[in-house]
Image (cartoon, rainbow, N blue to C red):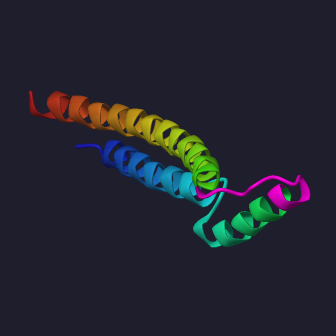
Amino acid sequence: MNNSEYNKAENAVDNTENSLKNAADNAKWKVEELSDRAKDYINEKRSNDEEATHEDWLDRVKNNASDTWDNIKDKANDAWEKTKDAAEDVKAEWNKKTN
């Protein structure tokens, strides 16, 4: 079997891994930032003479997490399709060699 087909499949898997890592690294709000964001939220509410509530804060975090999840899901879907295509190429090449 042609090693280049296996290499394509391995590269597709590596690209999948890198894609998912990049999506996670580029998340809008990282865990380390949450306490700073919470302080900003409280100060924003204070300056607008509004009450800072736990529920409102969690809604903001949830909306951000939802956006982040959508981004990760899109990257994962793209990576899946690329990996699947490479795997199908390897399978086709294998079938040619063995038939």
Dividing the picture into quarters, in which one does residue 4 lie?
top left
Residue at 90 percent across and 58 percent down: it is 47
Residue at 27 percent across and 37 percent down: it is 90
What stretch of residues is rendered in magenta? 45-54
Image height check: is 4 above or below 94?
below
Image height check: is 31 above or below 8?
below
Q: Position of residue 73 (x, y in %)?
A: 47, 40
Q: Nearer the viewer, residue 11 or 4?
A: 11
Query: For the N terminus, which image quadrant?
Result: top left
Query: For the C terminus, which image quadrant?
Result: top left
50 drawn magenta: yes
60 vs 90, left or right, is: right
52 vs 80, left or right, is: right
Q: Nearer the viewer, residue 74 or 34?
A: 34
Q: How many marks?
A: 0
Q: Position of residue 48 (x, y in %)?
A: 89, 52
91 vs 22, left or right, is: left
Image height check: is 19 above or below 31?
above
Q: Position of residue 21 (x, y in %)?
A: 52, 58
Q: Which SS does the magenta portion mostly show?
A: loop
13 drawn magenta: no
